[in-house]
Amino acid sequence: MAKVSNEEICNGIGVLEIDSPPVNALGAQVRCALDEGLRRMMASADVKAILIICAGRTFFAGADISEFGKAIVGPDLGEIFTLIEMSDKPVVAAIHGSALGGGLELALACHYRIAVPSAKLGLPEVKLGLLPGAGGTQRLPRIVGVETALDLIVSGRAISAHEARTLGVVDMLATEGGLRDDAIAYARSVLDQPLVRVRDRQDRLESAHGKPEIFADFRKKNARSFRGFKAPENIVKAIEAVVNLPFDEGLKREWALFKELEASIESLAQRYYFFAERETTKIPDVPKDIPTIPIATVGVIGAGTMGGGIAMNFLNIGLPVVLVEMSEAALDRGLGVIRRNYENATRKGRMTAADVEQRMGLIRPALDFAALADVDLVIEAVFEEMEVKKDIFRKLDRATKPGAILASNTSFLDLDEIAAATSRPEWVVGLHFFSPANVMQLLEVVRGRHTSKSVIATAMKLAKTIGKVPVLSKVCNGFIANRIMAQRQIQADALVLEGPSPQEIDQAVFDYGFAMGPFQMIDLVGLDVIGRGATTRSVAGDLVAMGRLGQKQAGGYYDYDEHRHATPSPVAAEVIASFAVDKGVVPSGKQAAADILARLLFPVVNEGAKLLEEGIALRASDIDVAAILGYNWPVYTGGPMFWADTIGLQTIVDSLRALETRYGAAFTPSKLLVELAKSGGSFTRG
Ligand code: 3H9
């Protein structure tokens, strides 16, 4: 096993350096090295103070997430942090990169903290469905106060070294690149100071004593965003303990609340999701070190909502964008929308007026494909019609330089047919953004039959550069996210004809954890938009024919008052009932929420299994990432495939079989699902 620590004494300061790539996670080996190194230095007469520093790209990024749920090997973090805090010699943490979770908790147990300006500090455990379980909830409030600690720990957001300095979390800023020397000098400068232990500090807690309303108000204010998650409530309880209990009792309370979360299915799901998100870029037949194509300029065709949103991703990272439209008016409209989006961000304090001008200055508007001659990547974002797309790609083939990547933002068309319109299908790839394209984190990278490996690797890398999570899909109708989630809508449309009302169906979906149900979503987006191009009669089509377009006009599945407050609509109920009669639908009567969910969501799981069977998706966890980031599937369920494993695949197969008997082949379980259920296998475990 490679050595993970180095020890050195510099001018009376014992420097304990941990070197455990990639992120110095505090796994068993690192904990042993820390424990042994610290004890040696504490015992050495030559060491006057101790410096803990990390090699590589970052300070400790936290506990080793893969160790949760397993027995602890060697000393645990709490023991090591007590050793540090109770040391008679000053212990200084020297921070670069990220000090996260257990990493920041270690630093808080030290007597002093010094950081380079580029460092980031945070307690992101909440994102793993956990709380800081090694003293973070008890020490941070003693430095920053209860209210700031609540905000930081419940949001899990990382703060800059400057903000940490202002809050008192960091005592001194080092020069960038000069951390080690500055930290040694700093450790020497504190040798004569009396030791201050965070555990003994009370000054920042006084204002919270006798004020339970701080916690009540915080809970009330955040109730909506806490919905379905277990960790935020336990974090609040742990911070209440800071005010109500002595330090050591508080630590015990924190540990009990941590263990409760560690064992919860919600945290298991969120930890699974952490690794799932990082797994998506691993493509078995594309080597990690394959050369990628440098992208310095981008072309976007179409300045509508989608094209404009796509362009913003590149402007935000400083890449020039050639924006092509058919007419001056369309260009002006598109530029206007981009500018307004940025100005909104300015109003919310997220960027300055100068930032807006800098980004707008990177756009080169054009009416001719000739302007695309030098770009490294073009993304086509025009409306979904095969002939139009083929015509564009034919022109792009002539207008762009050899070596330029030609991408389509199509959401369901056959990429191979589009690629065949060019003389270079190996340079053609799908980049399927989700709306709003400048906000949604999912980017489906669609691999055509001929797309080259280096184009795929470039697209995956570029996605990360613009802050997206890429998921690779092969070509099929709807790719991954839209294809699986279409099943939910198909079933909702069918079920509403059988008796359950739109609000009963929406409520079941909302209670499961989605932000809204399928009918609320249609009303929000617009019935005319959803039903555009429909060739068969539908309830939504009948409502549109009556002038009901959703929230924006006359209501849809719901009625709305002037504040867009929804109430059940007798008109919609009548339209649904008469449509059901015309179609000869047999009513199924009232249904329990669990049955509604099985009807709507088990087909989603089944479709996911088909994607795996057909080789469209690489792995079940990619499907979960696509559902969570593309459709806000509640992350604490782990996504449809992880959720299916939680329920048990045989239960899903049995339920699908029962639906198949009643409704037919749409519910026939996929071969893979049946096989896995039979063999006791799973999509995501083991
Ligand atoms: C905690 O500390 C609980 C405590 O309260 C103690 C309680 C008792 N563990 O993200 P990247 C892997 S909970 C294990 O691509 P970046 C990651 O999977 C923890 N592995 O790099 C990936 O592996 P691979 C609280 C980890 O530069 C590789 O490292 N801390 C851990 O884009 C590179 O990761 C957190 O939640 C870990 N803690 O971002 C922080 N962290 O190459 C989690 C990373 O095989 N980490 N890996 O795919 C991060 O946020 C980012 O990794 C970081 C670097 C910002 C550090």
Image (cartoon, grey):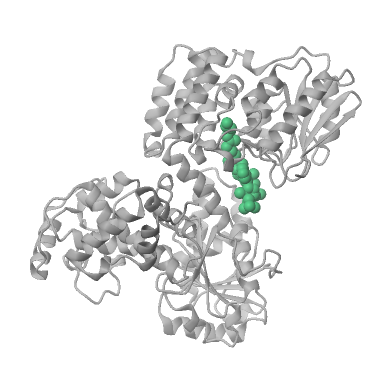
Residue drawn 27% across and 74% down?
Answer: 534
Nearer to the camera, 45 or 456: 45
Q: Classify 492 as above or below 233.
A: below
Give coordinates of residue 279: x percent, y percent: 57, 56
Q: Quadrant of residue 650?
A: bottom left
Q: Is residue 210 left or right of residue 317?
A: left
Taking the image as drawn, is residue 549 in sight?
no
Q: Residue at x 44, y 66 (%)?
A: 612
Tell me where residue 668 appears, x and y as whole percent: 28, 67
Q: Tell me the quadrant of ligand 1.
A: top right
Q: Return the residue nearer the eye: 1 or 159.
A: 1
Residue 671 left/right relative to 240: left
Q: Is residue 95 left or right of residue 189?
A: left
Q: Position of residue 238 (x, y in %)?
A: 49, 23
Q: Residue at x 40, y 73 (%)?
A: 477
Relative side of 458 to 382, left or right: right
Residues 375 and 3: in front is: 3
Q: Quadrant of the N terminus?
A: top right
Which residue extends farthest right? Answer: 11
Q: Is residue 194 above or below residue 139?
A: above
Of 262 and 565, nearer the camera is 262
Residue 40 at x, y = what percent? 81, 24
Number of numbered tags placed on the structure image: 0
- The answer, for residue 300, to whether it is visible in the render is yes
